[in-house]
Image: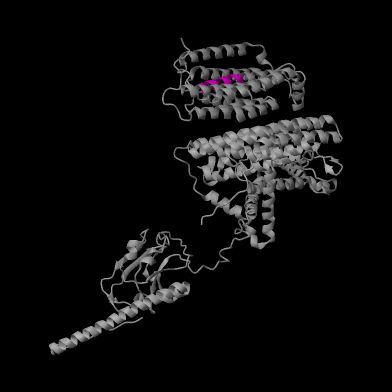
Amino acid sequence: MTESLDQIFVTLKHWLLSGFENLLKWLEVAPPDWLMPLVSMVLSLAPILMVFPALFAITTVLERKGLGRIQNRYGPNRVGPFGFLQFAADGIKAIIKEDLVPRAADKIFHFIAPVILVITAFTVYAVLPFGRNMVAVDLDAGLLFFFAVGAASELAVFMAGWSSRNKYALLGAMRAVAQMVSYEIPLILSSVAVVMITGTLSLTKIVEAQSTHAGLLPDWFVFTPWGFMGFALFMIAANAELNRSPFDLPEGESEIIAGYFIEYSGFKFALFFLSEYLSMFALSGLGITLFLGGWNAPFAVLDFIPSWAWFFAKLLALIFLFIWTRGTLPRLRQDQLMNLAWKFMIPMVLVNLVAAALWHFTGPGWMRWLSSGALVVGAYMLLGKPQFESKDIGKRTYRFAD
Amino acid sequence: MTPLAGYLLLSAFLFAIGLAGALTRRNAIIVLIGIELMLNAANLNFIAFWRYGANPEALTGIMFVIFAIAVAAAEAAVGLALIIAIYRHYKTTNVDEVNILKG
Amino acid sequence: MLGKGIIKGMAETARNFLGSYVSAERLTTVQYPEQRIPQIEKARQFPFLVFDGDDPMKGLRCVACQICEKECPPKCIYIVKSKDKRVDYKGQMQLYPATFDIDLSVCMSCQICVEVCPFESIKMDTAYELSTTDRFGGLMVNKHQLAKSNEHYRHIHPTDAAASDAALAVEVAKAQAKAKADIEAKAKAAAEAKAKAAVITPVAPKPVAAT
Amino acid sequence: MTLPFAIIAVLIVAAASAAMTLRNLVHSALAVAVAFGGLALAYLYLDAQFVGLAQILVYVGAVAILIVFAVLLTRGGEAPEKSIFSATWFWGLLITVAVFATLAWCVMHSFASKREPADKVEVTVKQIGDALMTKFVLPLEVIGLLLTAALIGAVIIAMREEKK
């Protein structure tokens, strides 16, 4: 029973595929040899193209409600029960709005920039394993594919900013690209630690490597010193890569209004948001796959819950983490942003690689906890101290006008 | 499958395009892009030769391309830094005007 | 240690997040169409014209002096004087506004028209749900829409209305005293004239209107 | 000649030609990014998965961005008024045609160019990693050194000179 529930979507796909084959046989049409792989591909990709935009719609509402609660407000609560249909109202508004293109804009690039962004955001889902046997394309170099396609989105961001012929847009695009290039290094290097331990770039194999249980804790990489630090660095870098608060300088409303998508309106504007949220889910999914055990259940007794349910539960938890940080932290300054990347994150991920190597070569036992942990904590203290120790400026005093 | 000649001709044509750009354009950045295209043409040759070679298990072509990509990235970084430095100095990126060393 | 502040902040926002579900007083937002906060007495939105008596048009205090029209900073008041005169609340012959329009979409609720009006005839209303689907004509109100009774004014701003009424009572009393004095003076003059000329009959005194 | 190869070849040639002839430098940079992407597709089509993805990561993700930044830092965002071709364009074109003719002649007359490929080659990332760490470990170290040197060198060259 649990087995069939776990594999329900895989079974469904095979059933549909064989049904299609039988239909062709019944119609006495000889399918060309490229047809069946194509149909199989479509059947794998169609759920991705439906589930994640739906998740985007729900997340926009949840984010606004969550941020509202964090700020002691209600959030949207008018459209539908508890305001959960707000996304429909937003979507209809985005579609029926006039699509303005600046007269001086580079029309072609202005049009294709959001399209490329959304395509790249969707493409990365191809290699993410959502559950047991649930991955669209099991690439041998899946992780590399993820980062390669993700890197292509930077060019789209630049295109959007440059083609708008707007100073704010160009500033926002330059900020965004500089930020994404800087934070891509810690993002990739923190994943390299996992690749070092598992010895593969295939995301399914990385998940399988975390499926065992050692005593009480599962063998997830987040429960190791280097894995914990790697996960923290990965999430910070992901936050920066997504241009979300506190790293939302590229779209800082108070300085450059909306950044690179300032000249976009209507549906194209909605596409920017869609791609931002899709990238957020994809990077969260990657974080889950790399550090949080993918679709594995945390305890062996909970294995009866289907694997895909675990994946989405973890995904929702990470989305909540993103919303929570957004509601908490104020925006960084540009120099703080670059200092954090180059003076803290990158040295830290390099030390983290050494810690992972120590962990790997020390062999099981408490020694590796001690050595790897001491290295990570020591480096953290050492690197964190000079740059970010808040100077003691004394207690704040207030003077009121009489 | 396409015969090897197809890839070699494509690579030669790409090389020619890059060379033409590097030799005929005024802007230093375009010259650099042309050089990058020439490097990429060579990479395509390596991959094609590896794929059509006698023993692809040796991975020689792939290794060469990986190193070539790394070298090209370094070259692009230094080259563009040079162009920016030249621009600061002469306020131009036109290679025809940066000829102060010409006798 | 690095990150201490972040964790502190996260704890604070978590407390807010959870607390907003537990304690209602954290959520200060008023759910507007269903819930309303009562307006304070000094609340003001847009001007209206005060009338006395039952007939709004006859009882308008406004005498079309156009001071408010001239003082209005955004120039949203438009007044046309009447051709004829009529008796006002003080019992004097006065002009009255043939047209009195205010463009509420331009009005900025500064209350200067109220400050400058010598006749206590324009006051600030508290109605604020004035939205309309016609953005050009919908907020252009004429004197029929502007006229509201003194009782309404007493209802929305009791303190101000009392002061206004007192001031008006003084004005009216003065006016009546003056009228009386005028009549007496006229009667006296008439008597004198009668006494002097003893042929001319005195002019009948004007009727006196009181509030 | 198969259809995928034809599509990839047309894409690469068109994008590269556009990059070399367009007036606007940013257009050139974006076109060359497309050409790099096309080359990555060619590598993927030739079963070199790792190289193809590395090509996208390095060229589209880094080199194209670098070029775009350089264009904007040298105020090349607008198309120039005067001719974009250098004074000696004729000789350049002549040399190019000569080079291409030579290369094409060599290719057409080479015995190797008629060769058919082996069946599907499967190269795993692990194989590449093993090769990098054993047979090619010296070049790898040299490349590491070169990249570090290039990083520092680029920073020093592009650094603003101190005003004295």
Tell me which segment is drawn in magenta: B28-39
Q: Residue at x 40, y 59 (%)?
A: C106
Position of residue A159 in the picture relative to residue B97 (left or right): right
Indicate the colouring scheme. one colour
Q: Residue A189's image quarter?
A: top right
* Vertical order, D160 against C72 (above or below): above
Where the N terminus of chain C falls, by quadrant? Answer: top right
Q: Residue at x 59, y 17 (%)?
A: B12
Q: Residue C197: where, in percent of width, then height?
A: 12, 88
Position of residue A399 in the picture relative to residue C117 (left or right): right
A243 and C18: which one is in front? Answer: C18
* Vertical order, C105 against C1 (above or below): below
* Vertical order, C48 against A369 (above or below): below
Q: Residue A41's image quarter?
A: top right
* Vertical order, C120 against A70 (above or below): below
A158 and C183: which one is in front? Answer: C183
Q: Residue C150: where, in percent of width, then height?
A: 41, 75
